[in-house]
Amino acid sequence: MCGIVGYIGHRDAYPIIVKGLQRLEYRGYDSAGIALFDGEDIKISKTKGKVEDLKQKAEVANNLTGNLGIGHTRWATHGVPNDVNSHPHYSNSGDLVIIHNGIIENYDTIKKALTKRRYTFESDTDTEVLINLIEEVKKKEGVKLGKAVQIALNEVVGAYAIAVFDRQKPDEIVVAKLGSPLAVGIGENEYFIASDASPFIEFTNNAVYLEDEEMAIIRLGKEIKLRKIKDDAIAYPDVLELKLNLEEIEKGGYDHFMLKEIYEQPRAILDTYRGRLLPDQGLVKMAGLDQHIEKFLNANRIIIVACGTSWHAGLVAEYIFEDLARIPVEVEYASEFRYRNPVITHNDVVIAISQSGETADTLAAIKLAKERDAFVFGVCNVVGSSISRETHAGAYTHAGPEIGVASTKAFTTQITVLTLIALKIAKEKGEFSASKFHEFLTELENIPGKVEKALDSNNIVEEVANVYKDSSNCLYLGRGYNFPVALEGALKLKEISYIHAEGYPAAEMKHGPIALIDDQMPVFVIATKKGHYEKVVSNIQEIKSRKGKIIAIVTEGDETVKSLADHVIEIPETIESLTPLLTTIPLQLLSYHIAVMRNCNVDQPRNLAKSVTVE
């Protein structure tokens, strides 16, 4: 949520910041702004709406010059989306300017105290309160900007990633982080600031990711210095070499990032198991798992914490771990787990799943699990993210950047990693014979090719989408391994097409949802020949007898369901536990095509953000 971009150096800041903001649009936002400083004048442009609206406003006002600048995309928390509440914000003197991701929870108390000291406020934001608190500290204590930021942040409660500059210091930007991501790109006598590395990848491959409760004073001609906000201790930056490339964050000829990412799944799955899946040697190798395998082998249970699509991947993993590795599993919404009093022991393994590695609720769940002495294993996609640093060990998915807000390749690569973990544990526990283990490894190796084949259904899916694009409600049904896929299919449709949809276990249809079925209700049924096929066929017959419209995902060559369904979409055959990697493909395509036909903003659906970094 929200996006930060900043630059200080020898280049014109405006084009760098605007392009950077466009690359952060996937994070979700409702307004945007930019502040540029040419050494004399600070020029701010900001507006409700999109970055394109900001560009037009800045160019009309000719607010384009300066070698220092900060920009922001805002997702409203305190104060409605409008021009005034958009960032950046000035201090009362006009000397200090700030952009801020996060929430200052005690802003109202601070605002009342500042009001008594004759500070005035134009906006309804907590951010304007913070910049004026920094100014008050700077005046009262007689300190420089960096120290004023540090003192002020010790007085606030909440989460933040901030960038601040002072009219009196044209060669300096101060940044700080707690609970919201912030990266600093390091170039030749220039620095880039952003919520992730995508805004500056064409300029430098070197970056520092701030840890929680760290700040940095970035000065031209000086090496970056990190300090701890609480105690002023010096922190030594770990400069990472970025593996991201520009091509990965561009659309590459596709109309939308979501469609590009759907079609990237064969490669993403291959990249995720590359070097880990070794069928010829009968091995699964995963460094983070291998070093801590005893934790899993001796675990009383596995607790999976996640949100959204990652939670659905966790539900698939519950079936996989219990079926293959015979370990009890509980899957928890991180947002609920963190606020109750869960029973956790040192014999539990907690697996935290997050595409971004920055999900606030999942990070809080990790901290709770660590406090209770559980072993915490992370599964995320973004190298250097907070979850990768907070967990005891983990595994990256290697999906590459996922820009579309609706997760697609994150889901399938998370399932791939979790399957590898389950297979490794099952083999170590002796749950598999050598031949059965080899069969699983070989079939998983073949999945990218089968996903390619599943993508061939695109034209059929588009025809189905055209029939049901104007539906008001939809049901998604699945059983066993494919019940979570039904949930995920419904979520995708809701997220990007704004059609109400619900996923259910197929057998639960008789416990309520069957009352909704009539000749206007599309029902998407996952009916592969693996698992509870006959039971699902019986559910389909119940829908048909009530005139519901049946769209079935079936194993290729299926004739029984084909004779019952209004539409059939085929996928290749595979082992039951791997079917979610294939059945989800046509449902992703379906939600995409319906959203396009309804003229929805596919990559940036309303009210949603890619990474939920605040509660």
Image (cartoon, grey):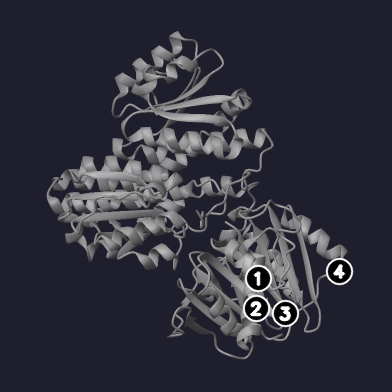
Which amino acid does the dot numbered 4 rest on? Asn
Cα separation, mark 2 vs mark 4, equals 32 Å
Residue type at tag 1: Leu
Please identify, in this view, whether the residue under mark 3 or under mark 2 is nearer the observer: 2
Tell which circle, 3 or 1, labels the residue nearer the N-terminal end.
3
**Residue type, numbered disc 3:** Arg
Vertical position of residue 502 compared to residue 153: above or below: above
Let me know if residue 177 appears in the view. Answer: yes
Q: Residue at x 40, y 55 (%)?
A: 362
Instruction: Give the mark nearest the N terminus, 2 or 1.
Output: 1
Q: State the separation of the CA atoms marked 3 and 2.
A: 32 Å
Secondary element at tag 1: helix
Residue 124 coordinates in the image, percent (x, y): 68, 58
| Furthest residue in direction front, as rendered | 116
Q: Circle 1 sits on which residue?
A: 114
Label 4 crowding class (10 Å Cα cut-off): few <14, some 14-19, many 20+? Answer: few
Residue annotated with mark 4: 62
- SS for tag 3? loop
**Which residue is tagged 3?**
11
Q: Earlier in the sequence, mark 2 or mark 4?
A: 4
Question: Is 472 or 91 nearer to us in this picture?
Answer: 91
Task: For marks 2 and 1, give the CA distance.
Answer: 8 Å
Label 2 sits on a secondary structure element that is helix
> On the picture, is 473 further left or further right than 42?
left
Nearer the camera: disc 2 or disc 1: 1
Q: Which of the two residues, 308 or 204, is positioned nearer the viewer here?
A: 308
- Asked if the residues shown at circle 2 and circle 1 are in contact, with their CB atoms under 8 angstroms apart, the answer is yes
- Residue that numbered label 2 is attached to: 136
* Sequence-wise first label, 4 or 1: 4
Q: Callout 4: helix, strand or loop?
A: loop
